[in-house]
Image (cartoon, rainbow, N blue to C red):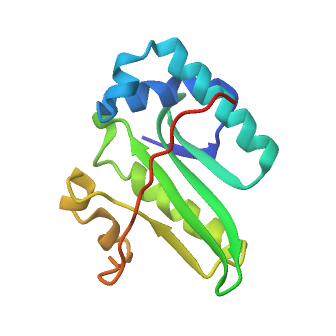
């Protein structure tokens, strides 16, 4: 079946919410009402559209959004432009059909067009994609000398 990769639209918030809930990774999302999560995603999509610092692409198959990727484009002094892939999710019923690969390939092409010198991402070792070596199969290298740190900040109202 044909897969179309396109820019995300506000009306995709429902499908993206369904994908996130189907993964079952976030206790917060699982406990939150579907409509609440959907509203937050729609708000974030609108914000990202205004800021123009991100690219959100969806994979569509027979009119249904079955996956998406989110990339942050940023500049820094030492290397120039980079892209950070913060999210790449495919609905669990659709994995293994090349959807994630198409999303990743599309982002790589966009990064080259933007003159980026590097794409980065974090993949948790407990994830199935890590076990399958999904990113390694696409030429990505695990940085053995790097540590990825996180600082959780208290929630604030926007």
- Position in image of residue 101 (x %, y %): 41, 58
The N terminus is located in which quarter?
A: top left
- Position in image of residue 45 (x %, y %): 67, 36
Residue drawn 18% across and 60% down?
131
Residue drawn 56% across and 78% down?
118
Residue 33: quarter of image = top left
The C terminus is located in which quarter?
A: top right
- Position in image of residue 4 (x %, y %): 56, 44
**133 or 120: nearer the viewer:** 120
Q: Is residue 101 visible?
A: yes
* Residue 79 left/right relative to 148: right
Determine the residue located farthest toward the right in the rendered image: 50
Compared to 13, does 35 lie above or below?
Answer: above
Q: How many marks?
A: 0
Q: Is residue 62 visible?
A: no
**53 or 113: nearer the viewer:** 53
Compared to 7, does 35 lie above or below?
Answer: above
Determine the residue located farthest toward the bottom in the rendered image: 78
**109 or 33: nearer the viewer:** 33
Residue drawn 50% across and 54% down?
86
Residue drawn 76% across and 42% down?
49
- Position in image of residue 99 (x %, y %): 41, 49
């Amino acid at each position: 079946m044909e897969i179309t990769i396109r820019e995300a639209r506000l009306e995709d918030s429902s499908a993206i919410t369904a994908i996130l809930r189907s993964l079952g990774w976030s206790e917060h999302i699982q406990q939150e009402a579907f409509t609440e999560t959907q509203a937050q995603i729609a708000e974030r999509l609108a914000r990202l559209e205004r800021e123009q610092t991100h690219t959100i692409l969806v994979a569509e198959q027979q009119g249904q959004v079955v996956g998406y990727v989110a990339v942050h484009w940023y500049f820094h002094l030492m290397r120039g432009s980079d892209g950070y892939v913060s999210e790449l999710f495919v609905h669990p019923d659709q994995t293994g059909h090349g959807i994630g690969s198409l999303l990743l390939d599309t982002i790589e092409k966009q990064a080259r067009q933007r003159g980026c010198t590097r794409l980065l991402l974090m993949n948790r070792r407990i994830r199935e994609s890590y076990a399958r070596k999904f990113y390694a199969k696409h030429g990505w290298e695990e940085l053995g000398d790097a540590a990825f740190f996180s600082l959780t900040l208290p929630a604030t109202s926007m």
